[in-house]
Amino acid sequence: MVLNDGAATEAGVTLAPRTKKQIQTELARHKICDAVVDCLDQFGYAETTINRVQERAGVSRGALTHHFPSKEEMMVATMEHLLAPVRNPIGANKRPDKRMDKAGAVERDLLRLWTRMVNTKEGRALVEILVASRTDTGLYGRIAPSLSKYDSDFNQEVVKLYRSVDLSDDDVATLWTICRVFLRGLHIQERFGSGPGQTSKIMKRFAQIIGPHMTMRAPE
């Protein structure tokens, strides 16, 4: 992530340059969120404590609680931190290779989604937060609006990039939702299966099953 103190624009309006203090605050928050991700991936949600995050981030307790006074606040900010770079589909800037049929391109994008976004420490950390929010009503209430917005943004993009072969175009978003749910669940299944090798085999087979139901739209 690139941070600078130059003027930014939003909806065509030039915004005032950020101050040095604002940039330092943003850097500190990102540093803490990165530490939360590491802890979630290594220890899980229940064992991701403020003390562990403080130690991993290398900040004082006062600095951490200044930015995030509670574990819930850390989790909400970390989820936003995780969703920010993945609001568009993995194939957003890709088109089918001329040597590859369009269904094959969909399979390629599904495998990339798994290897580059989901089966990463960031992807596993997000799953930890989502699972925790199932029973933590406070956390759920805080993250639900952002997740809903993320799903809406993602679905709008997939409809632009892919079309359905045997269903209506409205169902393309449903197919990709099924894919994302499956990929997140695969993290949990891996713990009870035969390990990464078997998971890779399952993922490849899933992509082969789903791929033929969609094709990539031709460039406009």
Image (cartoon, rainbow, N blue to C red):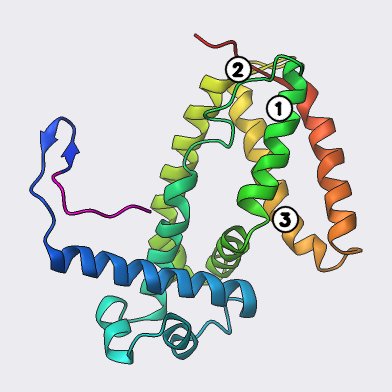
Q: Amino acid at mark 3?
A: Gly
Q: Mark 1 against mark 3, which lies toward the viewer? A: 1
Q: Which mark is drawn over residue 169?
A: 2
Q: Residue at x 63, y 48 (%)?
A: 116
Reply above or below: 201 against 178: below
Please say if the residues under marks 1 and 3 sit with CB atoms less than 8 Å apart.
no
Marks 1 and 2 sit apart, C-alpha to C-alpha, by 15 Å
Q: Residue at x 40, y 85 (%)?
A: 58
Q: Quadrant of the N terminus?
A: bottom left
- The stretch of residues the image draws in magenta is 1-7
Q: Residues within 10 Å of mark 2 (few under 14, many from 20)?
A: some
Image spot of residue 50 (x, y percent): 43, 86
Q: Amino acid at mark 2?
A: Asp
Residue 75 figure quarter = bottom left
Q: Residue at x 55, y 73 (%)?
A: 38
Q: Which mark is drawn over residue 55?
A: none
Image spot of residue 150 (x, y percent): 45, 44
Q: Mark 1 against mark 2, which lies toward the viewer? A: 1
42 or 126, which is in the foreground? 42
Q: Earlier in the sequence, mark 2 or mark 3?
A: 2
77 on left or right of 152: left
Residue extending furthest toward the left: 16
Which residue was labeled with disc 1? Answer: 106
Q: Residue at x 46, y 36 (%)?
A: 152
Which residue was labeled with disc 3? Answer: 185
Please say if the residues under marks 1 and 2 sit with CB atoms less than 8 Å apart.
no
Residue 168 figure quarter = top right
Image spot of residue 106 (x, y percent): 71, 27
Looking at the rendered structure, the secondary structure element under dot 1 is: helix
Q: Amino acid at mark 1?
A: Val
